[in-house]
């Protein structure tokens, strides 16, 4: 109580000095700033919820956590060989004091003998699994395979490691969620296709809930002659939470930046001169939580390519 009275007296003194020495508007602005800081101090310096998930893709920081000792216990709980886990393509993060989250990539070598319809060996099969585990003994709290991210060695579309973001995000004032993204890409110099898919998962009643699933945060489409002639359209996004809520969770605000680049190399024989062109378009999208997830309609419309 004494501390509150003392801080209030200091504020009133600074405010009265500001009235004499500076225009009233400036003094009021300073007073409000000090008052805000004082209220934060009196409320035990509660840390505000971070609303920004990422400003752009270059600003994303990946989690560096990977407890190999715990991972060994997890393999035992899953009854799989530790050697079947692709450690370089797996990620983890601590969810809370008792729980950790893993995105594991495992390989099934027994599927190497399978043949495609063209009688071509498909190679090893890689699977992606999400796990919430006990940090002490590695026991499984919740697990789920992601069939969309399974692939064979020789398939045209390959998936990267799922990169977990360094910091947890909060869907409301107390519900943490884990954010991660995975890149799909074509193994081709002619077809220019890559896509980074973004997912948010949380733990509800010991079950995995994907509140946002495979939202495209980066997408490139185009073609090339394998040299200096190409046309490519790229979507890149930023993502943050709004102050508004729907069904208890913050709305998601997504900024979209579309760019189109076209380039031609010299072709004397056909009378084509070297040139390049760049176009940009910006859009914004809001996603609202419907009680189960942040539902969205996938938009594959090109803004520039025909």
Image (cartoon, helix red, strand yellow):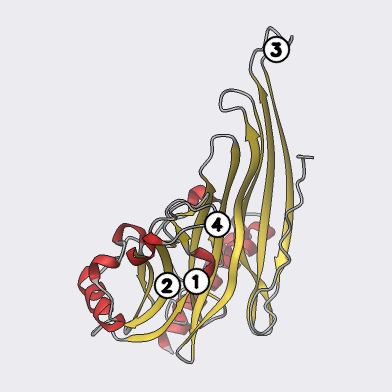
Of helix, strand and loop, which one carries label 1? loop
Q: CA distance from mark 2 to mark 3?
A: 50 Å
Residue holding disc 2: 129
Label 3 close to label 1 by CB (< 8 Å): no
Pick whichever, 74 or 296, lies toward us: 74
Q: Residue at x 53, y 39 (%)?
A: 188
Image height of 21 relative to 207, above or below: above
Q: Residues within 10 Å of mark 2 (few under 14, many from 20)?
A: some
Q: CA distance from mark 2 to mark 1?
A: 6 Å
Residue holding disc 1: 146
Label 2 close to label 1 by CB (< 8 Å): yes
Of helix, strand and loop, which one carries label 3? loop
Q: CA distance from mark 3 to mark 1?
A: 48 Å
Residue 299 placed where, x, y %? 73, 58
Q: Residue at x 37, y 60 (%)?
A: 112
Pick whichever, 269 or 256, lies toward us: 269
Of helix, strand and loop, which one carries label 2? strand
Quadrant where the C terminus sits is top right
Of pointers 1 and 4, the one earlier in the residue sequence: 4
Image height of 208 relative to 127, above or below: below
Q: Is residue 151 left or right of residue 19?
A: left
Of pointers 2 and 3, the one earlier in the residue sequence: 2
Q: Quick one: which residue is furthest to the left in this view? A: 69
Of pointers 4 and 3, the one earlier in the residue sequence: 4
Image height of 156 relative to 231, above or below: below
Q: CA distance from mark 4 to mark 3?
A: 45 Å
Image height of 113 relative to 210, above or below: above
Of pointers 4 and 2, the one earlier in the residue sequence: 4
């Amino acid at each position: 109580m004494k501390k509150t009275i003392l801080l209030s007296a200091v504020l009133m003194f600074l405010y009265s000095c500001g009235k004499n020495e500076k225009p009233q508007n400036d003094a009021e602005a300073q007073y409000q700033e000090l008052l805000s800081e004082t209220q934060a101090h009196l409320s035990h310096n509660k840390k505000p919820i971070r609303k920004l998930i990422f400003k752009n893709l270059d600003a994303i920081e990946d989690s560096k956590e990977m407890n190999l000792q715990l991972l060994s216990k997890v393999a035992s709980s899953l009854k799989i060989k530790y050697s079947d886990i692709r450690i370089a393509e797996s990620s983890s993060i601590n969810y809370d004091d008792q729980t950790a989250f893993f995105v594991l990539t495992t390989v099934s070598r027994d599927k190497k003998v399978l043949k495609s319809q063209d009688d071509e060996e498909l190679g090893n099969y890689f699977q992606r699994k999400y796990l919430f585990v006990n940090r002490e003994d590695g026991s499984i709290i919740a697990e789920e395979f992601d069939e969309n991210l399974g692939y064979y060695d020789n398939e045209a579309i390959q998936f990267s490691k799922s990169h977990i973001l360094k910091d947890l995000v909060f869907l409301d004032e107390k519900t943490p969620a884990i954010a991660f993204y995975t890149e799909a890409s074509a193994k081709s110099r002619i077809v220019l296709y890559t896509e980074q898919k973004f997912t948010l998962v949380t733990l509800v009643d010991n079950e995995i809930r994907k509140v946002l699933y495979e939202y495209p945060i980066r997408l490139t489409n185009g073609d090339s002659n394998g040299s200096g002639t190409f046309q490519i359209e790229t979507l890149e996004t930023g993502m943050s939470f709004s102050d508004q809520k729907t069904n208890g969770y913050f709305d998601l605000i997504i900024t979209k930046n579309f760019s189109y680049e076209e380039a031609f190399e010299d072709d004397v024989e056909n009378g084509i001169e070297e040139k390049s062109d760049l176009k940009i378009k910006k859009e914004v999208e809001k996603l609202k939580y419907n009680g189960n997830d942040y539902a969205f309609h996938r938009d594959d419309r090109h803004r520039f390519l025909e």
